Amino acid sequence: MTTTALTTGSSDVDAAPVSRWSAGKTGSDLIADFIAAHCSPDVFVVNGGACAFMIDALGRHPETGFVAMQHEQAAAMAADAIWRTSGRVGVTMATSGPGATNLITGIASSWFDSIPSLHITGQVNDREAKSTIGADVRQSGFQETDIAAMVTTITKHAEKVSSVTELASALARGLRIALSGRMGPVLIDVPMNVQQDTVDEDAYRLAFAAPAIPAPEFEPGDSAGSRLSAFLAGAQRPLAVFGGGLGLAGTARRVQDWCDANGIPYVTSWAGMAFIDRSRPGWLGSQGVYGARHANWAVQAADRIVAFGSRLDNRQRSGRTSAYAPFAPKLVFDIDPEELKKFSGGSYEGVLFDLAEIGDVLESAAIDFDIAAWSDLRAQAMRQETTGWENAVQPGELNPYAIVPALQREFLPGTIVAADTGATVCWWFQSYLADDSHIFTAGGNSPMGYSLPAAIGTQLARPDAPVVAVIGDGGLQMNIQELQTAVAYRTPITIVVFNNAGYGIIKQFQDSNTSGRYYASGDGYTVPDLGAVANAYGVAYHRVESLADVGPHLFERSLKLVEIVVPPNALITPKVDGDHFLHDQFPYEARGANALLPYAYPAKPSLLP
């Protein structure tokens, strides 16, 4: 994956785009030139009156284009996938009012997962409407909405511009903000008159300048290395945690090599899992509420934990975060000073650091311990553990934990998998095989319907790669209209739909908390005939009811929908329920390894000292 960097150097100006300036260019032309220079050239759009001039400029530009999506939330999700799979900044365009507000769910997905993206919205004409945005009047112009204010809490930067000079400055500043420090989305709101105003050469040059953006003062590498050495001194059971931030920094394999060389085992979040070599024995699995048994056991048994680029959210640490490795000190490396504030005090110590430079830390860290006994203890524990996957369904039913690896074995080399949410994403990440495929999901926001537009965006950005979307029946219905986008742009993706006729992850929650009353998850919720849906859109359809139905034909390079018929009550296992410790997962009959834990855990997390 290569990253498109902003212009740097003594001139602080990208001369090539500037040389393309000519009299008569408008704000819309400037936007198209900027996107061609710095972003993924195909912009995900839904047209409307307030953005039509900008989309027209994209269509006329020799180096940009547009992808006409059916819904703006899908456009933002497709743009989100661009950086994850190509290292280029994905862009959307939407009209004012409902078009802009529809972007919000996808923008939030990029915000929580630190994905840079650029969202350009049209706004009503300042000159004609005399916009009252920010005043007490609710609305002056038609569809006038203060989208910049609305997205303030889910973007790194959002602003409405009032002139072409402000537009030029906002483009340069906004993209640099998106790509600096902890990355994230940016939104620029452009009134229609600014889109049509002509741009003089001085304003044009502003867009291709490289403005300075304040950055946190990171700890020097040698100092951070000394802290890591001191932290691990005397450790007998060290463990590393790899988060998505390490992958985004591009150094996950570097840290993995260091851990392997020093005999330090490691676990991952689902986001971190996508960036490592999963075939190495040092990886114990992904931790968390839906994590692997052995990974969770190792977390609870460790006497030191070093986390690299992981926010350690409550899906990783469980709802009772104090019960996460309560007897082990933890050292957390992160680029975001605000993120580290939640780790201050107690058993946590934070290091403000850019993980792109983690090699300097590892080279200066002095590691000198013998953890052979730790390896032996883990081996003993693993021999006494079971996955619990056989408990997911009744005997004779199609087990999702069997179908996932069966499907994966038929992947073409280098497949990219966009995963959705709910039970489907759990089944996939829990039983995903180690191979050369790449899997990702919008883990922080986790919106239903993400994977279909994400797969479309991925396929358009990476036409060389086989692309698969894995989604549940509920998720598919959230963005089912994007089947038409896939048809229109002839994206040869395989859409794998796990149809359990309901919201499986919610049903399991209702089993534990509402006495199995499946209101609005099974009771009242319905699924259409997916074969008929596929036929209506002109999409090839395959139905899988048993392992015998799986074959390479499902992943040939053509657009198709593959329905996997899963029992309605198929469970997610293993799973941390209620107030249980991370190592004590359902189904509870597989508890043998817990007797080997080196600490005396109380019966319940609430009884911790």
Image (cartoon, rainbow, N blue to C red):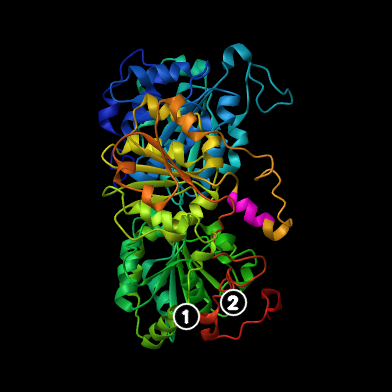
Query: Is residue 509 inside the magenta stretch?
Result: yes
Give the left or right position of residue 520, taking residue 36 as reference.
right
Crowd band around label 2 with a 10 angstrom C-alpha radius: few (<14), some (14–19), many (20+)? many
Q: Earlier in the sequence, mark 1 or mark 2?
A: 2
Res. 185 in view: yes
Rendered location of residue 152, percent (x, y): 59, 39
Task: Determine whether the residue tagged by mark 1 lies in a helix, strand or loop.
Answer: loop
Which SS type dominates the magenta stretch?
Answer: helix
Q: Amino acid at mark 1?
A: Gln
Q: Amino acid at mark 2?
A: Pro
Q: Which one is nearer the viewer's eye here, 553 or 126?
A: 553
Q: Image height check: is 87 above or below 272? A: above
Res. 155 in view: no
Q: Which one is nearer the viewer's eye here, 15 or 195?
A: 195
Rendered location of residue 187, percent (x, y): 51, 34
User: In front: mark 1 or mark 2?
Assistant: 1
Which of the numbered marks, if any, corresponds to residue 326? Answer: 2
Which of the numbered marks, if any, corresponds to residue 558? Answer: none
Whether tag 1 and tag 2 are in contact, CB under 8 A, the answer is no
Crowd band around label 1 with a 10 angstrom C-alpha radius: few (<14), some (14–19), many (20+)? some
**Range of magenta residues:** 504-510
Q: Give the CA separation, mark 1 to mark 2.
A: 23 Å
Give the left or right position of residue 277, taking residue 96 as reference.
left
Q: Image height check: is 251 above or below 518? A: below
Q: Image height check: is 251 above or below 43? A: below
Rendered location of residue 353, percent (x, y): 43, 62
Q: Which one is nearer the viewer's eye here, 322 or 309?
A: 322
Query: Is residue 205 inside the magenta stretch?
Result: no
Which residue does the numbered mark 1 point to in the structure image? 384
